[in-house]
Amino acid sequence: MSRWFTQITTLLLILFALGACSRVGLAYRNLDVIIPWTLSDYLDMNGEQKGWFNERLQEHLSWHCTTQLPGYLDWLDRLQSMVETNQVTDAALQARTTEAKQAIAETAREITPSAIELLQGLDDQQVAEMNEAFAKDLRKRQQEYLKPPLSQQIAERGARMDKRLNDWLGPLSAAQEQRVMAWSTALGDQNTQWIANRAHWQKQFSAAVAQRKSPEFPQRIETLLVDRERLWTADYQKAYANTEAQARSLFVDLMADSTPQQRQRLLKKIEGVRKDFTDLKCLKAAQKS
C-alpha cells in the first residue's frame, strides 16, 4: 500500500512510473499513477459502493487536474532545465524530490476523507477479504523479492534498472552499466527492510480498520495515508534514506557520463510526458476558464 509513495518520491522512479504507460493520458484516466488510490485493489466492493467510488473518483480527478497538474508542468520545466544546462546535481535532485513529496502529500490529504468514508462502510466480510488480499500481496512479494539469494536480488534489481534506463536514455555504455550494478550492490538487502515495513504498515492499517467505528479512526487513517513515514520501522527509515541517496548519486553519475544523444533522448521523453499532460481535456478546460 505504501509502495506507490516509495516509487514516486524518488526522482528516477517518478519518471519511470510515468513512462510505464505508453500514454500518460491513459494512466491519468485510470488514476493508477497520478492519484495514488489503490484501496480498490484490495476490496471487493458491492454495486452501491462501486457507484459511490467511481463518482468520488471523478471528483478527485477533476480537482487534481485543475489544481495540481499546472504545478506538475512547472516541475517538468525545472527538470528539463537541469538536463539542458547540465546542472544535474545532488542538491538539485533533492529539491525536485522534496517538491514531488509535497505534491503527493497534498493529493493524499485530498483523497483521505473519501478513503475514510469508504472504509467506515465496509462490512466484516469485506474487511476479512481485504486482510487476506494484504496477506496474499505480501506472500507474492516475499516470493519474488526475498526468496532468491541476495546475489540474485542484486542482479535482478540491476537488470530492472537497466531496462528502465534504456527506455529513457537509450543503450548504456559499459561504464554506465557498471555504475548501475554498483548502485544495485550498494542497496544490499534493501528488499528485506522494504517487505518488513510493508508488513508493518499493513498490520497497522488492518488494526485501524478493525476499529473503523471508533472516534479515533479518521485521524488514524490520515496518519497511515498522509504521514506514513511516522509509522515506518527504524530499519526502513534508514534504508529509505539510503535508497534516495543512492538513486540521486546514480542519476548524477549517469548524466555526467551521458552522451549528447542520451541527453536528447531524455529531453524528448520529458517533453512527451509534458505533451501528454497538456493534451488532457480537463487541463485545457481549466486553462481557458
Image (cartoon, rainbow, N blue to C red):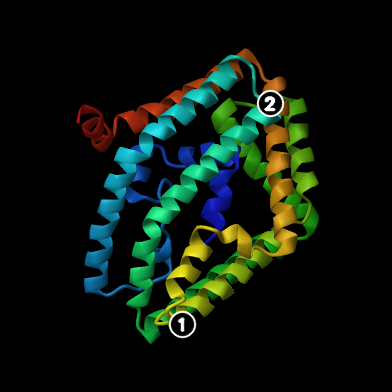
Measuring from the top left, give residue 197's x and y in whole percent.
65, 65
Quick one: SS at disc 2? loop
Above or below, 138 relative to 68: below
Provide the residue designation for mark 1: 211
Provide the residue designation for mark 2: 89
Please name the residue shown 61% across and 58% down the image. Answer: 229
Name the N-terminal-most of marks 2 and 1: 2
Measuring from the top left, give residue 97's x and y in whole percent.
59, 38
Q: Amino acid at mark 1?
A: Gln
Please name the residue shown 52% across and 40% down the image. Answer: 100
Q: Quadrant of residue 246?
A: top right
Measuring from the top left, give residue 115's x and y in whole percent.
38, 65
Please name the residue shown 47% across and 64% down the image. Answer: 222
Above or below, 212 relative to 250: below
Q: Nearer the viewer, residue 64 or 198?
A: 64
Q: Nearer the viewer, residue 173 or 116?
A: 116
Quick one: SS at disc 1? loop
Q: Is residue 58 left or right of residue 142?
A: left
Q: Which mark is residue 27?
A: none
Label 1 near label 2: C-beta < 8 Å?
Answer: no
Q: Amino acid at mark 2?
A: Thr
Residue 36: in sight, yes or no?
Answer: no
Residue 262: in sight, yes or no?
Answer: yes
Real-space Cα distance between discs 2 and 1? 46 Å
Q: Give the crowd class for mark 2: few <14, some 14-19, many >=20 residues within 10 Å.
A: some
Q: Give the crowd class for mark 1: few <14, some 14-19, many >=20 residues within 10 Å.
A: few
